[in-house]
Amino acid sequence: MSSDILRILLAEDDELFRLGLQMRLEREPDLEVVAEAEDGETAVDLTGQHSLDVVLMDIGLPGIGGIEACRQIKQNYPDLPVLF
């Protein structure tokens, strides 16, 4: 991990759920949501733009979907954990 704070990419297409999850995660002092994606393509793009410790991914994302987005992320960042 890059520091004491766990830097998270949150990939979820349901805006209300994504906001609620972000708010819940950021109540923890050692967690920070640094980027959010509402589709698979954006999740892949944002992974390359941020220094991340973990990706929280919805499987049913629009576009390429969560599984393909995960495949692409792991291809470029094999040590980055992706949780569904």
Image: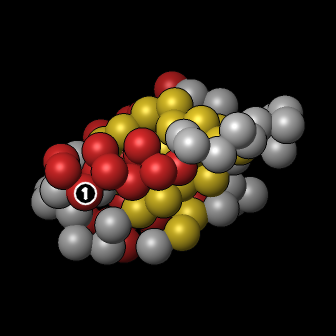
Question: If the image is split into quadrants, where does the N terminus sit?
Answer: top right
Q: Where is residue 16 in the image (x, y as percent from the top left)?
A: 18, 50
Q: Where is residue 10 in the image (x, y as percent from the top left)?
A: 42, 49
- Farthest residue, direction front: 27
**Residue 70 visible (yes or no):** yes
On screen, residue 80 versus residue 82, left or right, reads right
Farthest-out residue, top = 49
To which residue does mark 1 refer? Answer: 17
Percent coordinates x, y for residue 37 in the rendering: 31, 43
| 30 sits to left or right of 64 | right
Total number of numbered labels?
A: 1
The quarter of the displayed image where residue 81 is located: bottom right
Q: Which residue is drawn at 44% across and 34% down?
A: 35
How many C-alpha atoms fall within 10 Å of the one at disc 1: few (<14), some, or many (≥20)? Answer: few
Vertical side of 84 occupied by 72: above or below: above
Frontmost residue, 62 versus 26: 26
Which amino acid, by three-letter code, is at mark 1? Phe
Up-down relation of residue 23 to residue 54 (above or below): above
Residue at 45% across, 73% down:
84
Q: Can residue 39 be seen in this view?
A: no
Where residue 24 sits: x, y (%)?
Answer: 47, 51
Q: Nearer the viewer, residue 23 or 75?
A: 23
Q: Residue visible at 57% across and 43% down?
A: 27
What scheme was used to colour the molecule? secondary structure
Question: Which of the 4 image quadrants contains residue 14?
Answer: bottom left
